[in-house]
Image: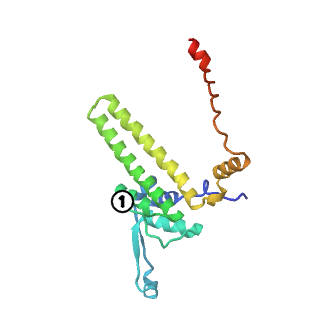
Amino acid sequence: MGVATFSDTPTAHDLARALADQLRLGAAPRDVTVHFGVRRLAAAQYDYRSRGGPVTAYAQALHAALYGLPTDTEPPPTALDALLQATHTATAPEQQTAVLRQVAEQLRNAAEILQRYQYRAQWDRFPDDVAEQLADAHGRAQQIAEALDRMAPAFSDRPAKGSAPGLRAARGRSSAAPASSSPSRPERPAASRSTRNSL
């Protein structure tokens, strides 16, 4: 059995979709909440506790628990302007991965908005190019979100700075040979005084 890499292991969004499917197949994770309780006979043993919340939040916690990721960091904000500010403060690799995943989730929200307006444009008989451009934007938003899902874990599993292939190649070139200077143009010999006087 081969070793799984970040490219073929399930993402937090994959887990969220699997949980949301328990309500209805194809349900959007952002629309689904979960609730945890205990059996009535065992309620006193657990101090009558219960918990619940968005399925996306529990999927992220489950993903972190399964793959040994830190769980004590605050979740990234959902508003895009706040996410932009978070890029300046998210210095830990796991925080950067979380920001990218949140951007992917917001792009999926944007894709759904675009699709709804595409249907509205078709229903209201807008010019064909309006619905076509909205459909194209919807597809592109989905593609970018899927790409971010694939790329985000790389920020938590990146190599050391000194081992980056591009940096090693650049260092090898700089130590192998000094930078060549541009060839200087040969100076034009100055005309002798006798030649100038004869002209």
Q: Is residue 154 above or below residue 176?
A: below
Residue at screen point 67% across, 40% down: 180
Q: Quadrant of the N terminus?
A: bottom right
**Front one among 165 and 105:** 165
Q: Amino acid at mark 1?
A: Ala
Q: Quadrant of the C terminus?
A: top right
Q: Locate residue 94, reporting x and y percent.
A: 52, 64
Q: Locate residue 53, reporting x and y percent.
A: 39, 68
Instruction: Tell me: 64 left or right of 120.
Output: right
**Front one among 177 and 135:** 177
Q: Locate residue 112, reporting x and y percent.
A: 38, 47
User: Which residue is under mark 1?
Assistant: 82
Q: Residues within 10 Å of mark 1 (few under 14, many from 20)?
A: few
Residue 29 visible, this angle: yes
Residue at screen point 50% across, 51% down: 148
Residue 55 visible, this angle: no
**Front one among 166 and 108:** 166
Q: Is residue 173 above or below residue 11?
A: above
Instruction: Tell me: 13 left or right of 163.
Output: left
Q: Residue furthest top?
A: 199
> Where, by quadrant of the figure, is residue 123 drawn?
top left
Q: Secondary structure at mark 1?
A: helix
